[in-house]
Amino acid sequence: MSESTQVNPSALSGAISELEVFAQYGLAGSLGTGAHYAVMWVLLTVVSPLAATTSGAAVGCLINYLLVRAYVFPSGRSVRGAFLRFLAVASGGVLLNGIVVCLAHSALPILPSQLLATAVVLVLGFLINKSWTFHA
């Protein structure tokens, strides 16, 4: 191999490590989403759908925060400070999701629009949480 085509093992290792962190972030989000749905499903028998999904979302958000803080981005930032930032990022994600779906749905069916929005929010949430929420 010429020098210009050689792969830097350190750079490759760093990229793999970053993909592992991203996968952990995605898994934490999936578990939080699962908790959201489970709580919502149980509560649907006793409260309105809006109350059920809102309660589920709150539980899912808390679980997601705890998992991300403990296993994905261990942080020296205070629990309160990181949680407030996490909530800000999550709120921004909800807003961005709506914007992307509305824009994409003008040209695409709803499912591809939502999949695109989910991907955008996932990647941006990962980058912002890594660099701002949990970065001490």
Image: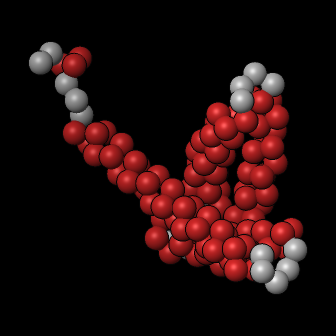
Specify the color scheme. Answer: secondary structure
Quadrant occupied by the N terminus: top left
| Residue 60 appears in the picture as rendered | no
Quarter of the rendering containing residue 38:
bottom right
- Percent of width and height locating residue 66: 58, 75
Question: What residue appears at the point 82 percent right and 34 percent down from the top-left corner?
Answer: 102
Question: What residue appears at the point 81 percent right and 25 percent down from the top-left corner?
Answer: 106
Quadrant occupied by the C terminus: bottom right
Question: What residue appears at the point 78 percent right and 68 percent down from the top-left corner?
Answer: 53
- Residues 124 and 28: in front is 28
Instruction: Tell me: residue 58, above or below residue 29.
Output: below
- Residues 41 and 129: in front is 41
| Residue 70 appears in the picture as rendered | yes
- Percent of width and height locating residue 29: 57, 61
Q: Is residue 61 left or right of residue 134?
A: right
Quarter of the rendering containing residue 103:
top right
Question: What residue appears at the point 53 percent right and 72 percent down from the top-left corner?
Answer: 67
- Percent of width and height locating residue 95: 82, 48
Q: Is residue 84 left or right of residue 20?
A: right
Q: How many marks?
A: 0
Instruction: Tell me: residue 115, above or below residue 89.
Output: above
- Residues 123 and 134: in front is 123
User: Which residue appears farthest toward the front when viewing the image?
Assistant: 45
User: Which residue appears farthest toward the bottom when viewing the image?
Assistant: 46
Q: Is residue 97 left or right of residue 28?
A: right
Quarter of the rendering containing residue 101:
top right
Q: Is residue 59 left or right of residue 122?
A: right
- Percent of width and height locating residue 117: 68, 40
- Residues 10 and 127: in front is 127
